[in-house]
Image: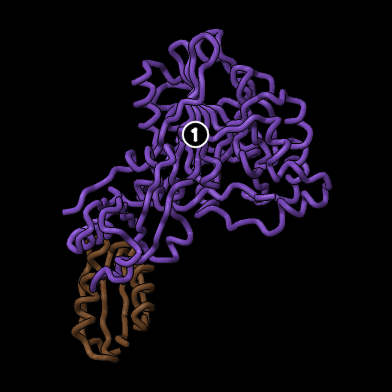
Amino acid sequence: MSNAISTKELAKKIINHEDTLILDVRNTDEFDNWKIEGEKVEILNEPYFNLLDGIALVADKLQKEQEIIVVCAQGGSSEMIADFLEEAGFTNVYSLEGGMKAWSEHLEPVKIGDLSDGGSLYQFVRLGKGCLSYFIVSNGEAAIVDANRMIDIYEDFSKEQGVQIKHVIDTHLHADHISGGRKLAEKVGGEYYLPPKDATEVMFDYTPLEDGKDIIVGNTSVQVQPVYSPGHTNGSTSFIVDDTYLLTGDILFVKSIGRPDLAGLADDWVGDLRNTLYSRYKELSEDLIVLPAHYSFAEELGKGGKVSARLGDLYGRNSGLQVDNENEFRKMVTENLPPQPNAYEDIRKINMGKITPDIDKQKEMETGPNRCAVEG
Amino acid sequence: MEVNKVIDAKGLACPMPIVKTKKVMDELNSGDILEVHATDKGAKSDLSAWAKSGGHEILKNTEEGDVLKFWIKKA
């Protein structure tokens, strides 16, 4: 019997930038659509059904003592292929427990930094999808921004930290993943915030986010200041946390910028997106540390798994911020867009509370990369 | 359509539907038709990709409730 590796152990290898060899045995269409990525990840694809009569197709590409992590959709096929490899004399073979389905759900907490009065800010990195959420701790209280569907992870973390979750905030109505925000707020008795302009069709009560109306975490110490920054959606709101960090949602990423088309109104929102990126953010301090809601490229994952950058630096190197000509910008963000995220229209409906598919269906809808960015 | 063999792979998780299908397919003659029933959602894309790589032809596939059915002609 081959050994198993957990998503947690694999996540540690990736955020620590360790050399990792993966043999992905899903069919090639699925592999091409979505796979495990990391700066030091080397990945081979050979569907398991081509290896049933023997592993000849991959044996030459692998070394007997090398660590090999076999991955499939749910963990069954990878276990079988890992056994085949062991029988063939490979000695350091692991099968990823739960496969890509479990990988899609893993959240890795990474500490970004300390806040005033002893608070801290954590980034929860969803390596399988490139989603980033934030856990702000101060004086026994917590605020969570852009919570994912797997709300137990935030709840467990709050218990470990000994803090009470008071505020749960979504920067916008998400289209690539199912928000856990409302459920989490209900479960812990916290307040759930949404930008009103993204909430015109929602079926539940929420607290509207308003520009200038600060949210205080832990008595008086840490301020979360909403900054209206439309463009990805009509309501997209950014947050300045503790005068140090800028949570940009899906407006500005480290290497790219947000796409304006996922709610169906690209042409209408291009002007807003440009205004936010080329005027509104420029009025803010260049020293703010940008913390986005997504990353798309392995190289955006920095030291220890952090995804962040100084705002002023992004004005020098982010390709989406270098387009002086307005027409060129319009073209860039409305033409040749990448494919839309899997099931994005139904995901928006779930996030509005209009439909509630069963949990297996929800997991299936969330498979695949986030695809919320356009590259300049 | 004259079916030479039927495989019931309902309730089996990946990789078993394909492992079973392949085993039976190996014993059939060229041109024979195999009918496969499965409930694993991944079976659809995997069976198509597997059939393609072996040159087998999927003549038809249906979805009846949770049950996926395939008719595959051996190369």
Q: Which residue is mark 1?
A: A303
Q: Position of residue A264 (x, y in %)?
A: 65, 51
Q: Is residue A46 left or right of residue A112?
A: left
To which chain does the residue with label 1 belong? A
Res. B64 in view: no
Against A12, residue A47 (above or below) is below
Which is nearer the eye, A354 or A170?
A: A170
Q: Is residue A191 left or right of residue A155?
A: right
Q: Position of residue A228 (x, y in %)?
A: 69, 30
Q: Position of residue A374 (x, y in %)?
A: 65, 50
**Disc 1, SS:** helix
Q: Report how many numbered discs are placed on residues in the image.
A: 1
Provide the letter of the chain coloured purple. A
Against A132, residue A288 (above or below) is above
Which is nearer the eye, B9 or A4?
A: A4
Estimate how packed mark 1 is, as few (under 14), some (14 to 19) or many (20 or more) residues with alpha carbons within 10 Å. Answer: few
Residue under the point 35% across and 68% down:
B46
Residue under the point 73% across and 45% down:
A269
Three-letter amino acid code at the position of disc 1? Lys
